């Protein structure tokens, strides 16, 4: 009688443990072997390794950049060089005076 009460008390623990054990056993039994996975994906793994080696080699071989990256493109996108700033300022002042309504 005591054993039945203990079994009823721990029935969820026993159920969860047995389900987990069956699941682990099924995964081990049905899962493909590691070498099978390696045989299937070896071209992908090799090409990825070669690509990473090429990145490291190009990083060491290339000369360091002397100009701040993107400085030229920012000047181009902004469209206003330092030489044009005084002229643009004069232009805007002239527009302000002519647009006044008396």
Image (cartoon, rainbow, N blue to C red):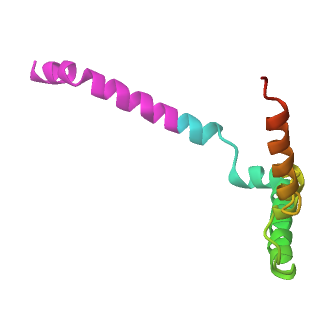
Quadrant where the N terminus sits is top left
Query: 29 above or below 50?
Result: above
The residue closer to the viewer here, 11 or 96, is 96
Quadrant where the C terminus sits is top right
Describe residue 15's horizontal placement relative to residue 3 as left or right.
right
| Farthest residue, direction front | 102
Query: 68 above or below 21?
Result: below
Q: Quadrant of residue 14?
A: top left
- Tell me where the magenta segment starts and ends, as one range: 1-24
Where is residue 69 drawn, in percent x and y?
80, 65
Does the magenta segment cover residue 18?
yes
Residue at point 36%, 32% (across, down): 17
Query: 57 above or below 33?
Result: below
Where is residue 61 drawn, in percent x and y?
86, 81
Residue at point 17%, 19% (across, down): 4
| Farthest residue, direction left | 2
Where is residue 27 drawn, in percent x and y?
58, 37
The residue closer to the viewer here, 98 or 82, is 98
Residue at point 61%, 39% (across, down): 29
From the image, give the main secondary structure of the stretch colored magenta: helix
Q: Quadrant of residue 45?
A: bottom right
Does the magenta segment cover residue 9?
yes
């Amino acid at each position: 009688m005591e054993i039945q009460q203990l079994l009823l008390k721990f029935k969820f623990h026993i159920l969860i443990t047995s389900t987990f054990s069956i699941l682990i056993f099924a995964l081990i039994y049905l899962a493909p072997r590691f070498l099978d996975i390696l045989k299937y994906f070896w071209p992908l793994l090799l090409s990825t390794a070669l690509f990473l080696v090429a990145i490291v080699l190009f990083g060491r071989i290339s000369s360091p950049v002397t100009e701040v990256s993107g400085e030229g493109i920012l000047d181009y996108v902004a469209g206003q060089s330092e030489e044009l700033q005084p002229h643009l300022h004069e232009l805007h002042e002239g527009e302000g005076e002519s647009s006044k309504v008396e």
